[in-house]
Image: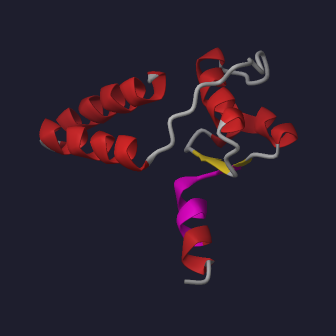
Amino acid sequence: MPLVLEYKAVGKREAEKLGIPLDTVNAIVSAFCFAGLKTNPHFRVRPVLPDPGDEFLLELAVAGATDAIVTHNVRHFAGAGPFGIRVLTPREFLRKIEEEPK
């Protein structure tokens, strides 16, 4: 739930700057919730990352056995490697999924 709340807060803040309707942000966050996997970490990996505010994201990724974290803050997730989690920029992620066989 913390990630959903963060997506809503950041989405609404950026939507106001860009003139995007708040209903659009709510629809996107709802789609993430519908398609996403609810994961409850039962352990902590802290402290690993330079920004303590990002630790819960790494814990979610580890608990959800994800392959990658997609972020513009790649340097904040330098500690993800030992957990087998790649850190990709949105551009790298889009290139990767474009290259995958259909």
Decide whether residue 1 is among the magenta residues.
no
* Image location of residue 21, percent across then percent down: 12, 41
Relative to 51, residue 92 above or below: below
Q: 35 and 95: which one is in front?
A: 35
Residue ranking furthest to the bottom: 102
Q: How many marks?
A: 0
Magenta span: predominant SS is helix
Span of residues in magenta: 87-95
Residue 12, position as x, y percentages in the image: 25, 31
Q: Observer-nearest residue: 59 or 51?
A: 59
Quadrant of the frame with the N terminus: top left
Residue at 41% across / 50% down in the picture?
Answer: 35
The quarter of the rendered structure image containing the C terminus is bottom right
Q: Quadrant of residue 97?
A: bottom right
Q: Residue at x 77, y 37 (%)?
A: 80
Asked whether 88 falls inside the magenta stretch, the response is: yes
